[in-house]
Image (cartoon, grey):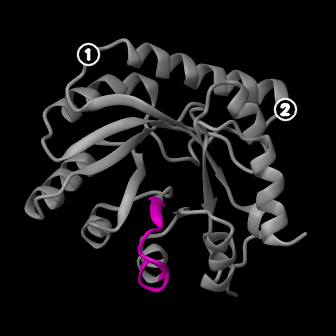
Amino acid sequence: MTISENIAEIRKTLPKDVTLICVSKTKPVELLLQAYDCGERNFGENKVQELVSKYEEMPKDVKWHLIGKLQRNKVKYIVGKVKLIHSLDNIKLLEEIERVYKNKELTAEVLIQINIGCEESKSGILLEDLQELLISCEKCSNVKVMGIMAIIPKGTTKENMMYFKQMKDIFDEMSTKNFKNISMKYLSMGMSSDYTEAIKEGANIIRVGRNIFGEREYKS
């Protein structure tokens, strides 16, 4: 199937309030432009260098999402280029985002990435450390938390639904709090293999790469 056919198939399954992010990591701009020509405007990249390179080549109305781990020394490269940072997971990174964006007199919109499966191989903050990060977020003036994100462990459909439900429960609980600089607008979870399950449990952002562009392409 072509990229346009893939997108059309995915679109048939999406409620109107769910944002599709086309995860374009390792893919050439030519393929991104095919998705763009189908009306897609939200693209996700894992690496800052790749995002910045594609930012220069793609139309300026693209909304870029940094969905991979963000190193503190790379924050300066994405200022003014990224719609949403999905991977805030520690206080030192928060402080660097706040410092860099304040210097540019801009505001960073971010999601807190939660390591819901407590996996050592994955980024994200553990639940026991979340409150401390939230307190620090409330002290910021140039960082706005817009919701939460997770990459769940690989598992069965039943296990997937359990993790997605846990995330939705956290999202709902945080929605009842009167935080400063923190709102629960976005729940970003679900990828090519499990996005339909994520939507059932309340995701309103899904991140789909393989089902649009095919398998990732890594340089040898």
Q: Residue at x 64, y 38 (%)?
A: 16
**Quadrant of the snapshot with the C terminus:** bottom right
Seen in the picture, residue 192 relative to 155 is either above or below; the reply is below
Residue drawn at x 67%, y 41% is: 190
Compare marks 1 and 2 and give the one earlier in the sequence.
2
In the rendering, at what x and y percent does residue 163 appear?
Answer: 66, 26
SS at mark 1 in the image: loop
The residue to which callout 2 is attached is 156
The amino acid type found where label 1 is placed reads: Asn
Q: Start and end of the magenta stretch?
A: 54-65
Q: Residue at x 37, y 37 (%)?
A: 146
Query: Looking at the rendering, in which quadrant would you find the N terminus?
Result: bottom right
In-front residue for pair 96/60: 60
Q: Which mark is residue 25?
A: none
Name the residue tied to disc 1.
Answer: 178
Determine the image quadrant of residue 147. top left
For residue 4, above or below residue 179: below
What's the residue at 56%, 31% (across, down)? 116
**For residue 172, side relative to residue 211 (left or right):** left
Counting from the top left corner in percent of width and height, residue 70 is at: 39, 59
Disc 1 crowd rating (10 Å Cα; few below 14, some 14-19, many 20+) is: few
Taking 3 as reference, is 162 above or below it? above
Q: CA distance from mark 1 to mark 2?
A: 36 Å
* 19 inside magenta stretch: no
Q: Residues within 10 Å of mark 2 (few under 14, many from 20)?
A: few
Q: Does residue 215 appear anywhere in the picture? A: no
| Displayed quadrant of residue 40 | bottom right
* Residue type beneath disc 2: Thr
